[in-house]
Image: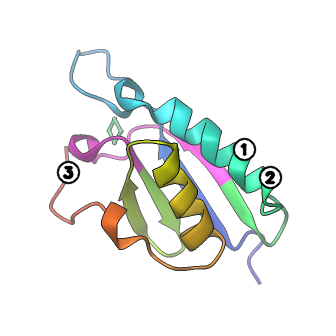
Amino acid sequence: MSYFQRHIFFCLNERESGKSSCAQSGAQAGFDHCKSRVRDLGLAEVGGVRVNKAGCLHRCAGGPVAVVYPDAVWYTYVDNSDIDEIVERHLKNGQVVERLVLPDDVGL
Ligand code: FES
């Protein structure tokens, strides 16, 4: 068994060049809310879910973005209700939230 069942990585990068970045699109708030929900649901235990910060994940055009491993599912989100759905359906129950999946062709 893996130490954690799933990791979710949130890009929190802020680009100094003035180009759009996840930090400008509410990434910190999304990360904080996810961390809180995972903790409140009792998922933040060994064998559960780890919520991690990340730098640029190279998919800035779809920001804010987060990726769930080992499933390798990429998400974009707008608000806390999107984060709640990712936590409840994917992180807790292993079901991909199709409506929030980042299209494969979204990159920089
Ligand atoms: S700034 Fe978030 S993916 Fe690049």
Could you tell whether 25 is left or right of 81 in the image? left
Q: CA distance from mark 3 to mark 2?
A: 33 Å
Question: Which residue is the site of mark 1?
Answer: 36
Quadrant location, the C terminus: top left
Please state the quadrant of the image where ligand 1 appears: top left
Q: Is residue 26 above or below residue 46?
A: above
- Asked whether the residues under the numbered discs 2 and 1 touch, taking CB atoms below 8 Å apart as contact, a structural biologist would say yes
Crowding near the residue tagged with mark 2, few <14, some 14–19, many ≥20 C-alpha atoms within 10 Å: few
- For the rendered model, the colour scheme is rainbow
Determine whether the residue tagged by mark 3 lies in a helix, strand or loop. loop
Q: Residue at x 38, y 62 (%)?
A: 74
Question: Which residue is the site of mark 3?
Answer: 107
Question: Which residue is the site of mark 2?
Answer: 40
Q: CA distance from mark 2 to mark 1?
A: 6 Å
**Disc 3 or disc 2, which is closer to the eye?**
2
Tag 2: amino acid: Asp
Region rendered in magenta: 51-65
